[in-house]
Image (cartoon, helix red, strand yellow):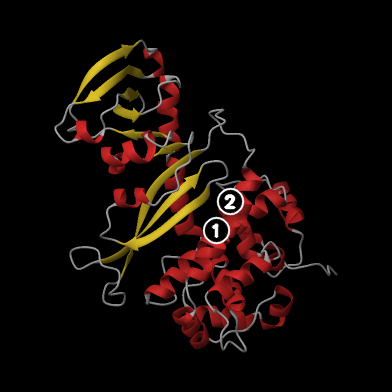
Amino acid sequence: MNQGKTVFAQLMSLIPEHELKKCINRYNGDFHSIKFTCRDQFMVMSFAQFTNRSGLRDIEATLTAFSSKLYHAGLKLMPKSTLAEINEKKDWRIYQDFAQVLISQAKELYAKDYFRLDLDNMVYAFDSSTIEVCLQLCPWAHFHHKKGAFKMHTLLDLRGSIPTFVYLTDGKVHDSQIMDDIPVEAGAYYLMDKGYVDFDRLYKLFQQQNAFFVTRAKDNMVYEIKEEREVDTETGLISDQSILLTGYYSSKYYPDVMRMVVYEDFRKGIVYRFLSNDFLLPAITIAELYRQRWAIELFFKWIKQHLHIKTFFGTSQNAVYTQIWIAICDYLLLIIAKKKFHLEQSLYIISNAVGLVLFEKIPISKLFERIKKLNINQEDENQLTIW
């Protein structure tokens, strides 16, 4: 009989306990907590994320069903009323700060990973995802047309798909306003869609900070061509130009020359106009860089599908933000586990498999060896039910 740790315990063993305790103490998280601590809350909420529980009652029922296995997994049987109260009262910033600890660990682990465009520079994608909630239940989440929603603004390190910066706001906040808060590194590339074309911010935050941006031009942009370079049209490139903005305000906000690369996607028949302040990379690399921005769309899709944030276990801002930040921490634990356990599988396979065998005492590395023997791939999700 296998006497090792359960899969869930192996994942949770990656938690730096001292750092988590520091985050808890910073906000007096365990003040007057006798039976259930912040760590207990984190464990139960993580279990709910990995196993895709649908609500507080479902969490309690599932934990009760596996009560004989909870001790070895490091879990406690927590009544739904207790979990609801803890989610309302424990400060969500505890898990925001703890996520920063896990981000630092993940960035160190993936720092030397190969980037497909063979760039030594750091490459980040920045975007937001709107998550709808019921305004009557969550009156703090104002959006528009009597609807409720909040936004998750995320800066994603494309080496390892690590969310290095996450900022939660209500749905009315315009995406470009959060550009003022993102950490900008000199020499790094920042990939953004046209919703972030704010020439004043592009100039001050990136051009003047010696950082590079790649974004898309808006249709109403007014400019004049200062220089034109030859391109290989067989690659889809149409033109590579140096331009100067001529609009009354835009010319004042961004007085320097910019680069505009025009590219046609033959498969879709769509022409894109990319803007950048980098004049050294080949034009086709600028176009390819912007294509890498879609990694953040996949991140949002993945975290919504595989970590349970569509159904919330509370309605207050504190409860919702707590659930989001614990979900982000769980995502980070998975990508740390992927590297530390030398897993070749995608996060898609890892998350599906782990969620079904949390109480099994199987070394995670051997678990995926068994899955590999069964030739399970991303299209064979149904086969995972054999566990």
* Mark drawn on residue 9: none
Towards the viewer: 191 or 84: 191
Q: Residue 382 placed where, x, y %?
A: 57, 55
Q: Residue 224 placed where, x, y %?
A: 20, 20
Give me the residue at 61% from left, 34% from top: 114
Q: Residue 100 placed where, x, y %?
A: 55, 58
Report the Cα–Cα distance between label 2 and label 1.
20 Å
Q: Which residue is mark 1?
A: 100
Give me the residue at 37% from left, 54% from top: 129
For residue 68, above or below residue 16: below
Instruction: Kindly state the secondary structure of the residue where label 1 is placed.
Output: helix
Residue 345 makes an appearance in the image: no
Marks 2 and 1 in Cβ contact (< 8 Å)? no
**Amino acid type shown at disc 2:** Leu
Q: Quadrant of residue 241?
A: top left
For residue 375, above or below residue 81: above
Q: Which residue is mark 2?
A: 347
Left or right for 29, reference 259:
right
Which image quarter is the N terminus in? Answer: bottom right
Q: Nearer the viewer, mark 2 or mark 1?
A: 1
Tally of numbered discs? 2
Give me the residue at 30% from left, 24% from top: 257
Towards the viewer: 170 or 360: 170
Towards the viewer: 252 or 147: 252
Left or right for 6, reference 126:
right
Residue 235 makes an appearance in the image: yes
Instruction: Kindly state the secondary structure of the residue where label 2 is placed.
Output: helix
Q: Quadrant of residue 361?
A: bottom right
For label 1, the crowd category at 10 Å Cα-Cα, with few meaning under 14, some 14 to 19 and many 20 or more, is some
